[in-house]
């Protein structure tokens, strides 16, 4: 496949390496410095676009790919207030758009465990819910997209959990999920969900050892999306 990389940073580089190892060709590696290349690029020769840039550039990059008729796989976090616009554009153009806050298979298993645990905790009113996410110091958004997915999944399962907020923000009542976002040099991504009562704690945790799992997941999805249409997610891709 011919792949264009929109955002050739820490993730874009590992994704390109894995894609090339799997026999794909990278037709362009776009950063903020060479983005003008997109003005002259013929999209008809590109099979898939992989977008891992930054919150401010995601919508422009995704719109470029969708307008070119290129299926696009997006891992950029921190821009989701505009997701509906991108989905509408995809539908109006008959394109394909895939977003995941986390492409790692391990995290997607963790999402399932989180949903199952939340279902069990719905009736357990004595437990307060909190979350911690730890990432490297270059991360631009907080909380992480993964933490938001975890929190939204809990809100969908637990009646008393009405919303999430960062623990640095003020809280009006105790029915929120408090998220602590820590930034520590080089940490690829650690997420912990804790239910605390007076008598005990129940905790689930996922620790990424590197960015490889995220990158491999994005390449596998890119191979899968090639001839598909519509708004797609990990639930469509994974069979578990
Ligand atoms: N969903 C998932 O599984 C994962 C998601 N992420 C997310 O992916 C995103 C990228 O992460 P990471 O690679 O660590 O970030 P980096 O900061 O290392 O890389 C970002 C890249 O985007 C480029 N960029 C900036 N502006 C534009 C633009 N207008 N058009 C195209 N490219 C642009 C930067 O170029 P320049 O250097 O010139 O500014 C850089 O190459 C983040 O939002 C992160 O949260 C990360 C890991 C996993
Ligand atoms: O910025 C990162 O590095 C990561 N971002 C994603 C997120 O915001 O959840 C996924 C992963 O945790 C790494």
Image (cartoon, helix red, strand yellow):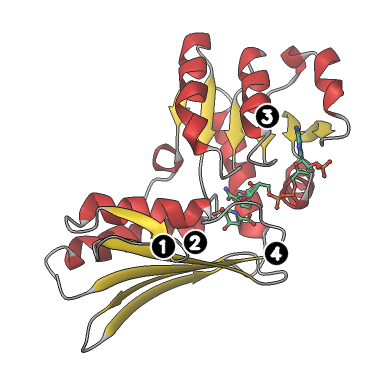
Mark nearest the camera among 4 and 3 is 4
Q: Residue drawn at (66%, 52%), measured in percent from left and top?
A: 140
Q: Give the position of the N terminus as an image quadrant.
A: top right
Question: Image check: 178 left or right of 19?
Answer: left
Disc number at residue 137? 4
Q: Earlier in the sequence, mark 4 or mark 2?
A: 2
Q: Find the distance from the CA under tag 4 to the CA under tag 3.
A: 27 Å
Q: Position of residue 8 (x, y in %)?
A: 79, 42
Is residue 26 visible in the rendered image? The answer is yes
On screen, residue 65 above or below 205: above
Locate ligand 2 by image quadrant. bottom right
Gap in angstroms between the C-alphas marked 1 and 4: 24 Å
Disc 2 packing (10 Å; few <14; some 14–19; many ≥20): some
Alpha carbons under labels 1 and 2: distance apart: 6 Å
Q: Which residue is mark 3?
A: 49
* Foreground: disc 4 or disc 2: 4
Q: Earlier in the sequence, mark 1 or mark 3?
A: 3
> Which residue is found at the position 48% from the left and 10% from the top?
92
Q: Going by the image, does 113 lie left or right of 139?
A: left
Q: Earlier along the polypeptide chain: callout 1 or callout 4?
A: 1
Name the residue beneath numbered marker 1: 110
Of labels 1 and 4, the one closer to you: 4
Say which element carries label 3: strand
Q: Is residue 132 above or below residue 83?
A: below
Query: Which residue corresponds to mark 2?
Result: 106
Task: Count neighbours of disc 1 (C-alpha within 10 A) and say few if under 14, some if 14 to 19, many if 20 or more.
Answer: some
Q: CA distance from mark 1 to mark 3?
A: 27 Å
- Looking at the image, which is closer to me, 228 or 96? 96
Q: Position of residue 10 (x, y in %)?
A: 76, 53
Secondary-structure class at tag 1: helix
């Amino acid at each position: 496949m011919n792949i264009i990389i929109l955002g050739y940073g820490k993730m874009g580089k590992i994704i390109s390496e894995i894609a090339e190892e799997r026999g794909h060709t990278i037709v362009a590696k776009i950063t903020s410095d060479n983005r003008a290349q997109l003005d002259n690029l013929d999209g008809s020769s590109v099979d898939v676009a992989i977008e891992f840039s930054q919150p401010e550039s995601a919508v422009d990059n995704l719109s470029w790919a969708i307008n070119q008729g290129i299926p696009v796989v997006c891992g950029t976090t921190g821009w989701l207030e505009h997701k509906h616009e991108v989905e509408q554009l995809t539908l109006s153009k008959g394109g394909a758009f895939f977003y995941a806050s986390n492409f790692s298979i391990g995290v997607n298993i963790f999402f399932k465990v989180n949903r199952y645990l939340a279902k069990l905790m719905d009736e357990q009113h004595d437990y307060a819910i909190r979350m911690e996410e730890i990432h490297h110091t270059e991360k631009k958004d907080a909380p992480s997209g993964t933490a938001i997915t975890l929190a939204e999944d809990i809100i969908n399962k637990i009646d008393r959990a009405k919303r999430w907020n960062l623990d640095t923000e003020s809280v009006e009542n105790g029915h929120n999920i408090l998220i602590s976002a820590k930034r520590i040099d080089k940490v690829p991504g650690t997420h912990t969900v804790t239910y605390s009562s007076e008598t005990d704690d129940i905790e689930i945790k996922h620790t990424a050892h590197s960015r490889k799992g995220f990158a491999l997941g994005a390449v596998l999805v890119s191979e899968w999306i090639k001839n598909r249409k519509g708004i797609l997610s990990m639930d469509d891709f994974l069979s578990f």
